[in-house]
Image: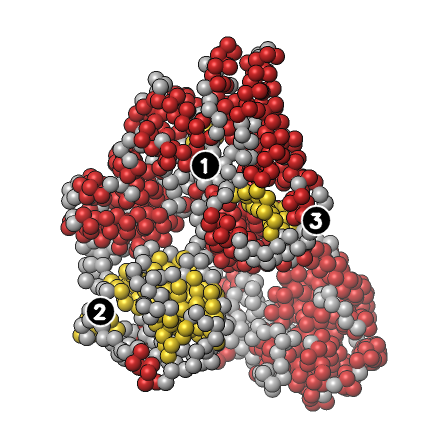
């Protein structure tokens, strides 16, 4: 290949690299420079930096292709070879260097004439060099880094132009709707691109152009005359640029025209100076914070038109010179450029309005996208909040009870107590109370229907149901009330989103859920949009968990009105006795109204029976008379009797005899039904079913019933439903789940029929359930129950298979240890011996059980179960099983989070990252991943770190165990106190209220209260169960040491002495001497922390050195367990042998 062809080949190759620009060079002869050019090309490609600033050479000299090392350090990569604007031969074209000289001369003259203006301009450019925003930069914080000479500033100007071109390229992404404006921008970009390609060292001419495009493309309105001037200058830049090429095109060799040429060059430089001045001033005006520095007088801000006229006058001077100096062909080319500039100017002037319209469209589109995004997040928030939809519960309850009759509740609308609550703004609470079966729930359903008809009422309600665990706790009540409030007023979701956006679903489920939800509800009720809110809670007596907390919240003054219903229970009476502005409506005191309502209900039920059984009038009337005479104002009694009369085996001719066999009153009726079940052919199966339903911790499904009751395991689905129907006076089946028809039915079985249903006692029934659960788990559990594809399969993507292998064992998987715990002690000790059934289960099925817990999202319950089981085994004295469970506990505590995320990681990460001699790892060695050739070398045994508690946002300053070792409290510089379950590591409470760092925490001897000192000079006394602040003592100083006196109601401090909690004010300060007597220093034997806080010690001997991050806070010690607060906000819990 010939050298010239080789050179052409290299030019073509590098032309494909379009991202950066190669400097234009006057090419030497191919034979002498081919090697240098190739080397230079590879050096440029390798350096991957900006092209160096090079000194301009004379027009007739050729620049060397070789570069200094300093130049290489800033040279661009993969840029195409130069392509001059006019078609000239590379060997004879000196134009780039002349353009560079003239433009740089014009820039230097501007800098000399207006140094303050250019100085500010160069500071703006300096800010842009670093990718910053000049709008936010200050004069003091920004240095002028632009080089003083053309050589030193060349590379910087190229970088600025390239950045400007990149920004204009991004405008293409919004081209829809601004085609003309975008075409104008792209045309200017093409001109800049081509010119910079031809003469990169003249980049000083194009920096202002790129910034001018940025000004035109900004939707914010600037001065109209200034925008018009910018459009004019930008549109004619190609004309200005080509003046140089036309200047030299035809007459460059004619010496006679030298004087004219010098005159023309002078006028061109003056024109360029005015152009640069206009661009620089426009840029400084655009960045207003810099414009203020220069001053209004220098800018002539009100005279943009005058400055543009000066540019046009300079153009005219150049054109007059060109008439004398250039040929007709040159003038023709100039006219063509002038015409093109005119069209371009019009489009550029339209950019501002076009871009403004587009920005408006984009803003609208962004708002729509943001709304969709917010809607999606709001939907997820509601989805996480929803435990149940109370509207669906209401519908289900009404259908189960045979429908809601308006005549059965309309009496209350005219009741004086109800009207007082409704009409009196000061009556905030209506308490409807009565015995079981009096129709309280249906009465509230009717009240809800009536109140919903009234405009302006924001109604929210919840139905507590003791037969269903998820609907029988205070947190569930708040979730339901909040859910319905948001459903009616969607804007209220903002009060939830404030916390949910950070915490996710755990906000409603973790140990702090009650506190968080209480604050959310309070914020919602204080929102003006919630004016007129009415909150209704049915069957408060069936709220089993944290009912006192719920009652405390209800009786607090608020803008909402409340209606609650309950049985006549003393503990509820005691709480509500403190409520002010309440109205009590006792159903027993409205017996006449209730009886009339029941009579209406009887008429409705008898009508349906008559139609079903084809009663004649005589039978119909007889049934109605008997029901009216024996109902005693009890809806439930009527419902149960009519249900019995409706069964298929009660013939019409037997109706009256059957009816008379049902005694008045609920308890006698329940007793009669137990006797009826005992006489049936399925008596044993029915009793087993009732016994099981009476002691389970949640309603169970038919599949679970069959797995747990051995007498039912040979029955099919239809036969199981028949058994439930035979227990119909006590049980009902809804969507495959077994419920008691009423809480009173379960109460009767446990209190009055236990000898018939539970002849061996409740404890034995628990043991039977444990034994059966352990058996079905041992038979069913295996690896990868859902046949998931990969070990990392996320729990969020898991869907149960059909049929679901976990369906029969879901209940057993979670509750088998709880039933063992509640079993007879003698039976427990026997089953927990070494090599017994429990021992074998842990040895062979433990990992499969953990996988199952992960699939059921019940790992936290599993942790509690292992702790509970370990405690039982210790009592039983089984040494080998105790050691195995100790290891099993460390295993689940270490890997719980991993298994929660991806259940199959029980066999991968959990095994691989457990100690080499972990008993669990050794037992399940065969389950370790065979696809892992080289496994990490782990420590031999479990280290002392039992678990790490995370939740504080700053350093933990104080940690303390409760006296029983079951709970752990930590105080932090994040101003909060947290109470943890010491066994599981779950955060039970977060106590907020201190204004500064918490410095000390301590439990009372009984664990019911907790005291915390703070840098806000207060001590707060908290209810450790509810998290409520009972008392705040303003002690006037920071207390670092607190202790409860175990024998009296007093709090002691080594800082100031005795604090009597029975008195609101602080007692006199005890002097230092008496304080020391009150609280002598206690020397601990066993495990503890050294006096300097640097060592964990045993009997005073240094055992474990603590790194600095694990010092500083007050540690907690519970026998061989040590808890340390860390600077990171974590609490490290360690246990030693």
Mark toward the start of the polypeptide (1 vs 2): 1
Q: Is disc 1 placed on a helix, strand or loop?
A: helix
The front one of 684 and 1063 is 1063
Residue 23, picture quadrant: bottom right
Mark toward the start of the polypeptide (3 vs 2): 3
Q: Is disc 3 placed on a helix, strand or loop?
A: helix
Quarter holding the C terminus is bottom left
Q: Which residue is mark 1?
A: 743
Distance CA(mark 1)–CA(mark 2) = 50 Å
Residue 297, horizontal then vertical, whole percent: 78, 86
Q: Residue at x 33, y 64 (%)?
A: 1005
Is residue 393 positioned above or below 548 on the image?
above
Q: Residue at x 63, y 61 (%)?
A: 170
The front one of 476 and 718 is 476
Q: Which residue is mark 2?
A: 1087
Question: Quick one: label 1, few (<14), some, or many (20+) residues within 10 Å?
Answer: some
Residue 976, horizontal then vertical, whole percent: 45, 67
Q: Is residue 428 left or right of residue 932?
A: right
Q: Which residue is mark 3?
A: 423
Residue 352, horizontal then vertical, whole percent: 76, 64
Q: Which mark is residue 196?
A: none
Q: Is residue 1051 left or right of residue 652?
A: left
Residue 125 visible to the viewer: no
Question: Quick one: label 3, few (<14), some, or many (20+) residues within 10 Å?
Answer: few
């Amino acid at each position: 290949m010939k050298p010239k062809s080789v050179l052409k080949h290299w030019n073509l190759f590098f032309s494909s690299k379009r991202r950066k620009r190669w400097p234009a060079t006057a090419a030497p002869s191919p034979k002498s420079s081919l090697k240098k050019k190739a080397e230079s090309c590879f050096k440029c490609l390798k350096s991957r930096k900006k092209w160096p600033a090079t000194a301009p050479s004379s027009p007739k000299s050729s620049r060397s292709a070789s570069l200094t090392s300093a130049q290489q350090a800033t040279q661009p990569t993969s840029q195409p070879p130069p392509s001059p604007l006019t078609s000239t031969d590379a060997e004879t074209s000196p134009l780039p260097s002349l353009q560079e000289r003239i433009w740089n001369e014009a820039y230097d003259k501007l800098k000399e004439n207006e140094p303050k203006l250019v100085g500010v301009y160069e500071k703006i450019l300096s800010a842009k060099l670093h990718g910053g925003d000049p709008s936010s930069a200050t004069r003091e914080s920004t240095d002028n880094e632009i080089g003083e000479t053309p050589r030193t500033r060349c590379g910087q100007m190229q970088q600025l132009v390239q950045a400007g071109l990149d920004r204009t390229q991004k405008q293409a992404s919004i081209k829809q709707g601004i085609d003309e404006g975008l075409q104008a921008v792209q045309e200017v970009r093409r001109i800049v691109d081509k010119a910079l390609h031809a003469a990169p060292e003249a980049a000083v001419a194009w920096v202002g152009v790129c910034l001018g495009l940025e000004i035109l493309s900004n939707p914010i309105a600037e001065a109209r005359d200034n925008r018009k001037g910018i459009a004019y200058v930008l549109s004619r830049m190609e004309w200005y640029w080509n003046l140089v090429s036309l200047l030299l095109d035809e007459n460059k060799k004619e010496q006679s025209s030298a004087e004219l040429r010098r005159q023309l060059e002078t006028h061109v430089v003056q024109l360029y100076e005015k152009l640069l001045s206009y661009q620089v001033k426009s840029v400084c005006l655009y960045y207003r914070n810099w414009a203020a520095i220069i001053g209004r007088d220098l800018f002539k801000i009100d005279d943009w038109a005058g400055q543009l006229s000066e540019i046009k006058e300079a153009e005219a001077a150049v054109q007059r010179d060109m008439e004398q100096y250039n040929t007709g062909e040159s003038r023709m080319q100039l006219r063509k450029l002038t015409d093109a500039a005119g069209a371009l100017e019009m489009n550029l002037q339209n950019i501002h309005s076009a871009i403004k319209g587009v920005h408006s469209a984009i803003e609208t589109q962004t708002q729509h996208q943001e709304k969709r995004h917010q809607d999606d997040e709001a939907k997820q928030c509601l989805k996480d909040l929803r435990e149940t939809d109370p509207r669906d519960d209401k519908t289900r309850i009404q259908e189960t009870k045979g429908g809601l009759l308006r005549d059965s509740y309309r009496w209350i609308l005219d009741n004086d107590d109800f009207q007082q609550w409704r009409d009196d703004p000061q009556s905030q609470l209506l308490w409807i109370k009565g015995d079981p079966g009096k129709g309280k729930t249906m009465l509230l359903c009717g009240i809800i229907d009536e109140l919903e008809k009234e405009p302006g009422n924001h109604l929210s309600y919840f139905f507590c149901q003791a037969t269903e665990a998820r609907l029988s706790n205070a947190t569930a009540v708040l979730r339901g009330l909040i859910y319905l409030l948001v459903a009616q007023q969607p804007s209220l979701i903002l009060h939830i989103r404030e916390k949910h956006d950070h915490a996710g679903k755990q906000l409603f489920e973790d140990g702090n859920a009650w506190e968080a939800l209480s604050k959310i509800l309070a914020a919602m009720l204080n929102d003006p949009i919630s004016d007129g809110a009415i909150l209704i809670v049915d069957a408060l007596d069936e709220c089993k968990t944290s009912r006192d907390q719920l009652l405390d919240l209800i009786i607090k003054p608020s803008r909402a009105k409340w209606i609650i219903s309950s049985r006549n229970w003393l503990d509820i009476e005691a709480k509500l006795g403190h409520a002010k502005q309440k109205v009590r409506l006792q159903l027993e005191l409205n017996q006449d109204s209730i009886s009339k309502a029941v009579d209406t209900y009887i008429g409705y039920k008898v009508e349906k029976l008559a139609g079903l059984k084809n009663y004649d009038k005589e039978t119909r009337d007889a049934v109605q008379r008997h029901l009216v005479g024996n109902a005693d104002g009890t809806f439930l009694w009527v419902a149960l009797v009519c249900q019995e009369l409706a069964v298929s085996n009660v013939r019409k001719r037997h109706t009256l005899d059957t009816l008379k066999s049902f005694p008045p009153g609920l308890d006698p009726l329940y007793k009669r039904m137990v006797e009826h079940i005992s006489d049936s052919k399925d008596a044993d199966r029915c009793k087993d079913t009732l016994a099981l339903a009476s002691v389970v911790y949640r309603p169970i499904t038919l599949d679970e019933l069959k797995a747990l009751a051995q007498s039912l395991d040979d029955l099919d689905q239809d036969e199981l439903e028949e058994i439930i129907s035979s227990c119909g006076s006590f049980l009902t089946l809804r969507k495959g789940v077994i419920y008691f028809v009423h809480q009173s039915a379960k109460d009767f079985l446990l209190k009055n029929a236990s000898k018939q249903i539970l002849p061996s006692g409740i404890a034995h029934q628990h043991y039977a359930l444990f034994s059966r659960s352990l058996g079905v788990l041992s038979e069913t559990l295996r690896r990868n129950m859902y046949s998931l594809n990969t070990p990392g399969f996320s729990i969020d993507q898991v869907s149960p298979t059909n049929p679901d292998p976990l369906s029969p064992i879901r209940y057993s998987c979670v509750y088998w240890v709880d039933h063992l715990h509640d079993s007879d002690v003698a039976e427990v000790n026997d089953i927990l011996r070494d090599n017994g059934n429990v021992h074998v289960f842990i040895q062979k099925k433990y990992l499969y059980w953990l996988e199952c817990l992960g699939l059921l999202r019940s790992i936290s319950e599993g942790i509690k179960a292992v702790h509970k089981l370990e405690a039982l085994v210790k009592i039983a004295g089984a040494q080998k099983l105790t050691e195995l469970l100790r290891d099993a506990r460390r295993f689940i505590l270490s890997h719980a989070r991993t298994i929660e995320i991806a259940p199959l990681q029980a066999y991968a990460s959990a095994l691989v990252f457990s100690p080499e001699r972990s008993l669990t790892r050794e037992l399940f060695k065969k389950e370790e991943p065979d696809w892992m050739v080289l496994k990490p070398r782990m420590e031999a045994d479990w280290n002392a770190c039992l678990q790490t508690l995370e939740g504080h946002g700053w350093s933990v300053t104080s940690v303390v165990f409760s006296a029983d070792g079951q709970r752990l409290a930590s105080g932090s510089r994040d101003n909060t106190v947290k109470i943890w379950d010491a066994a599981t590591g779950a955060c039970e409470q977060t106590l907020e209220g201190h204004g500064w760092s918490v410095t000390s925490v301590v439990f009372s001897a009984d664990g019911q209260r907790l005291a915390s000192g703070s840098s806000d000079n207060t001590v707060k006394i908290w209810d450790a169960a509810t998290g409520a602040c009972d008392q705040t003592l303003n002690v006037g100083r920071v207390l670092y040491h607190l202790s409860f006196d175990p024998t009296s109601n007093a709090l002691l401090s080594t800082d100031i002495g005795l604090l009597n909690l029975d008195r609101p004010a602080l007692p006199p300060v005890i002097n230092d001497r008496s304080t020391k007597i009150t609280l002598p220093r206690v020397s601990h034997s066993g495990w503890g922390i050294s006096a300097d806080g640097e060592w964990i010690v045993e009997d005073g001997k240094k055992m474990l050195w603590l790194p600095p991050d694990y010092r500083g806070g007050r540690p907690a010690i519970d026998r061989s367990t040590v808890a340390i607060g860390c600077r990171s906000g974590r609490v490290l819990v360690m246990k030693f042998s």
